[in-house]
Image: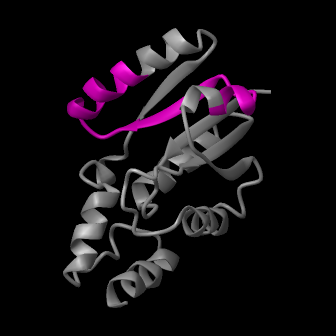
């Protein structure tokens, strides 16, 4: 069984993230969406909120599981018996950063492979940071996040 992990902060999950999840689910037997618990970042949503959002969005994808982790990704991969990491690439600048991480992960865990999926052109500009920025000023985020996520993001900024 080929298990792949798609790691990220997903704060919030975007249409670009969902595109990568759906495409990955067609490529591998099991996808684990690994929501990173990064205490160094000031997240808009808690880890549990992010996990719940993604679980709801992927409930009809039988080979997708959502979990959270902290610490090194390679350690989490070993724990999950996964030897594939999925990363989405929007632009060349993403590749420069991601290739360094992939190579470092390979040094730490030689059995790991990183698979890069290029983003759908519709989402090549999109990031969670952009979503938060737009939402913080009351901007329209309907083209950025799944419909069910919109009221959750808006509620955070109204609070």
Q: How many marks?
A: 0
As for residue 139 lying within the magenta part, the answer is no
State the image quarter where residue 128 is shown.
bottom left
- In the rendered structure, the answer to whether residue 104 lies left or right of residue 139 reads right
Residue 37: x, y in percent? 53, 51
Q: Is residue 126 above or below residue 34?
A: below
User: Residue at horizontal 75%, vertical 27%?
Assistant: 81
Q: Is residue 67 above or below residue 97?
A: below
State the image quarter where residue 156 is shown.
bottom left
- In the rendered structure, the answer to whether residue 4 lies left or right of residue 124 reads right
- In the rendered structure, the answer to whether residue 56 lies left or right of residue 151 reads right
Tell me the quarter of the image containing the C terminus: bottom left
User: Residue at horizontal 61%, vertical 65%?
Assistant: 48
What residue span does the magenta drawing correspond to?
A: 76-101
User: Residue at horizontal 51%, vertical 23%?
Assistant: 114
Seen as rendered, the residue at the extreme front is: 40
Residue 158: x, y in percent? 34, 90
What colour scheme governs how the chains and residues are painted in the rendered image of this protein?
A: one colour
As for residue 78 lying within the magenta part, the answer is yes
Residue 140: x, y in percent? 26, 80
Q: Is residue 148 above or below residue 102?
A: below
Q: Nearer the viewer, residue 119 or 80?
A: 80
Tell me the quarter of the image containing the N terminus: top right
Residue 90: x, y in percent? 30, 40
User: Residue at horizontal 29%, vertical 28%?
Assistant: 97
Seen as rendered, the residue at the extreme bottom is: 158
């Amino acid at each position: 069984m080929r298990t792949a992990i798609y790691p990220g902060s997903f704060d919030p999950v975007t249409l670009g993230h969902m595109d990568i999840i759906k495409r990955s689910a067609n490529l591998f037997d099991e996808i684990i969406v690994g929501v990173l618990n990064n205490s160094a970042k000031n997240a808009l949503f808690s880890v549990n909120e992010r996990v719940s959002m993604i679980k709801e969005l992927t409930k009809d994808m039988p080979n997708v599981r959502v979990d959270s982790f902290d610490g090194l990704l390679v350690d989490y991969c070993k724990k999950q018996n996964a030897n594939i990491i999925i990363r989405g690439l929007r632009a060349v600048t993403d590749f420069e950063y991601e290739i360094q991480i992939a190579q470092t992960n390979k040094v730490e865990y030689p059995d790991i492979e990183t698979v890069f999926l290029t983003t759908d052109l519709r989402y090549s500009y999109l990031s969670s940071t952009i979503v938060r920025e737009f939402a913080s000023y009351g901007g329209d985020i309907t083209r950025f996040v799944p419909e069910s996520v919109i009221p959750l993001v808006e509620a955070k900024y109204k609070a």
